[in-house]
């Protein structure tokens, strides 16, 4: 038997494998162990305070100490800690949450299927779409369209939709038929002299030509985040989404809005598709659905998708798909209470009200020597660290953003470096005062790294 290490720190180094972590660097530096939360703040095992500038992983809308979510979980654990949804079984929280989601999501999205995570949800979307096209007698209509820098999860299928190099390299992905189109990032990928409108037109032309070249009869669905998150907080150019929606409709291609980050007010509108003016056939939500207090994701589909699937289950006798914890009663009870809090405290409205202060605070860094571009919308934003003239990373790609995130952590702000971008996405309960503190701490980190880099 292995010797039991004598501290949490040593035990973590000895026995854990961390996601999205350089394991050898972790063995040398060890973990930051977070032990408690209070509103937008968390505290480590040494008692040091941090503002959680990324709401955990873009997800803790109501903050880190909401007693109503604890109470909802305990009440449900007392009443019925677990039941499944297979073979006509149901439980009240799952029924009520599906009903609530049908009420608050955009017109037409009337049905919910629950999974434990965003990755599983996107896997389920792929399987639903394949199942549906087999049901409709068009077995060749199976390919997905996604975008480079899009993030849709990390399972074999959802990871294939993701368009980021670290998620493919040496994992032998993509493993399903998917074409990644140009990332809709005007500053970075706009051609010399091209206007934003011309950039949009070029991307829409690329979409249409890709569909025609591959054959519309082979393309099943287009998936995208309205505003990209983990690829570096990338807001789309004007007119992009309505254009994508029109082309998809023309070629009978399903449109999937991945709202795992955008959903429930993050962009200052209830859902991201509403910010950019399109209506999807399928919407994927997670994260802020439960404020991540419990693992849960919900796929919402319209009647066209549901009816094709439902008819086929009648022919086959079942829908051969589902998770042990699909519609978990405790997760759904927490989700319901969380949505109630978001509604009662008008947290989506708070995001819209604080958007000007938050975005102005971000944009105040536009002239900073390390910053190439500032972008964001609602309560999500990013600073891309780059040479302003060449738009290329300063030094090794990703290194500077990692240093800024580390310096910010030392200054009491947890944010996230995604490639060359330092991302912020605070809890929806954030106040103007918190926002001022976030930017004071981030500014100190940027200045420190800039001074060291001289
Ligand atoms: N889709 C988007 C847009 C995401 O941001 C994420 C996670 O960050 C996922 C899907 C995957 O969700 P999960 O990490 O719960 O599997």
Image (cartoon, rainbow, N blue to C red):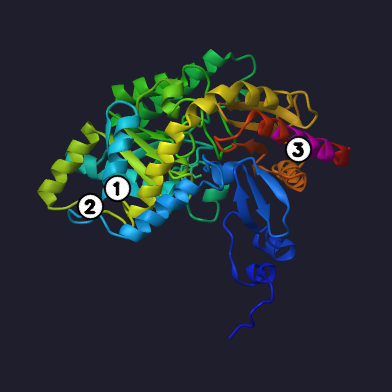
The residues tagged by marks 2 and 1 sit, at their Cα atoms, a distance apart of 7 Å
Q: Say which quadrant the C terminus sits in.
A: top right
Point 74% across, 30% down: residue: 371
Residue 233 screen position, x and y as percent: 58, 33
Q: Is residue 144 above or below residue 186?
A: below
Which badge, 1 or 3, is on the more N-terminal residue? 1
Label 3: how many Cα within 10 Å (few below 14, some 14–19, many 20+): many
Dot 3: element: helix
Question: What's drawn in magenta, residue-wise?
Answer: 438-449
Q: Is 277 situated left or right of 3 in this image?
A: left
Point 15% across, 44% down: residue: 312
Residue named by callout 3? 441
Residue 204 screen position, x and y as percent: 44, 21
Q: Is residue 173 above or below residue 98?
A: below
Dot 1: element: helix
The residues tagged by marks 2 and 3 sit, at their Cα atoms, a distance apart of 48 Å
Asked if marks 2 and 1 touch (Cβ < 8 Å), the reply is yes
Q: Is 344 situated left or right of 399 in this image?
A: left
Taking the magenta stretch, the answer to whether it contains residue 442 is yes
Which picture quadrant has residue 188? Answer: top right
Which picture quadrant has residue 255? Answer: top left
Taking the magenta stretch, the answer to whether it contains residue 400 is no
Label 1: how many Cα within 10 Å (few below 14, some 14–19, many 20+): many
Asked if marks 2 and 3 touch (Cβ < 8 Å), the reply is no
Residue 324 visible, this angle? no
Residue named by callout 2? 90
Q: Is 163 situated left or right of 412 in this image?
A: left
Residue 40 visible, this angle? yes
Residue named by callout 1? 94
Point 70% across, 66% down: residue: 27
The residues tagged by marks 1 and 3 sit, at their Cα atoms, a distance apart of 41 Å
């Amino acid at each position: 038997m292995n010797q039991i290490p004598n501290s949490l720190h040593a035990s973590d180094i000895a026995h854990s494998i961390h996601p999205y972590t350089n394991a050898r660097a972790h063995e040398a530096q060890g973990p930051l162990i977070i032990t408690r939360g209070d509103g937008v703040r968390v505290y480590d095992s040494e008692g040091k305070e941090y503002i959680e500038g990324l709401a955990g992983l873009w997800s803790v809308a109501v903050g880190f100490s909401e007693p109503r979510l604890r109470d909802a979980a305990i009440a449900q654990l007392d009443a019925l800690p677990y039941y499944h949804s297979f073979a006509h079984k149901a439980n009240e929280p799952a029924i009520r949450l599906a009903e609530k989601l049908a009420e608050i999501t955009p017109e037409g999205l009337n049905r919910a299927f629950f999974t434990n995570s965003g990755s599983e949800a996107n896997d389920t979307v792929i399987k639903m779409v394949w199942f549906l096209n087999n049901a409709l007698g068009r077995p060749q209509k199976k390919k997905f369209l996604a975008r480079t820098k899009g993030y849709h999860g990390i399972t074999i299928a959802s990871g294939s939709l993701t368009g980021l190099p670290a998620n493919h390299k040496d994992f032998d992905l993509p493993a399903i038929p998917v074409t990644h189109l140009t990332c809709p990032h005007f500053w970075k990928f706009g051609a010399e002299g091209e206007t934003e409108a011309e950039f949009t037109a070029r991307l829409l032309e690329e979409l249409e030509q890709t569909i025609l070249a591959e054959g519309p009869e082979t393309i099943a669905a287009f998936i995208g985040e309205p505003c990209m998150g983990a690829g570096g907080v990338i807001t789309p150019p004007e007119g992009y989404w309505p254009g994508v929606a029109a082309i998809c409709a023309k070629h009978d291609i399903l449109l999937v809005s991945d709202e795992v980050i955008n959903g429930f007010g993050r962009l200052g509108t209830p859902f991201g598709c509403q910010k950019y003016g399109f209506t999807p056939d399928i919407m994927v939500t997670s994260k802020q659905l439960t404020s991540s207090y419990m693992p849960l994701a919900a796929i919402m589909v319209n009647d066209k998708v549901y009816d094709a699937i439902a008819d086929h289950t009648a022919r086959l006798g079942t829908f051969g798909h589902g998770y042990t914890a699909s519609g978990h009663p405790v997760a759904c009870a927490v989700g319901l209470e969380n949505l109630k809090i978001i509604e009662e405290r008008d947290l989506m409205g708070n995001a819209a009200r604080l958007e000007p202060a938050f975005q102005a605070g971000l944009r105040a860094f536009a002239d900073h020597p390390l910053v190439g571009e500032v972008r964001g919308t609602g309560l999500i934003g990013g600073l891309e660290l780059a040479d302003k003239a060449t738009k290329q990373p300063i030094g090794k790609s990703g290194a500077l953003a990692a240093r800024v995130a580390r310096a910010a952590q030392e200054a009491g702000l947890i944010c996230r470096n995604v490639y060359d971008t330092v991302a912020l996405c605070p809890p929806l309960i954030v106040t103007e005062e918190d926002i001022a503190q976030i930017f004071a701490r981030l500014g100190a980190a940027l200045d420190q790294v800039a001074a060291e880099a001289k």
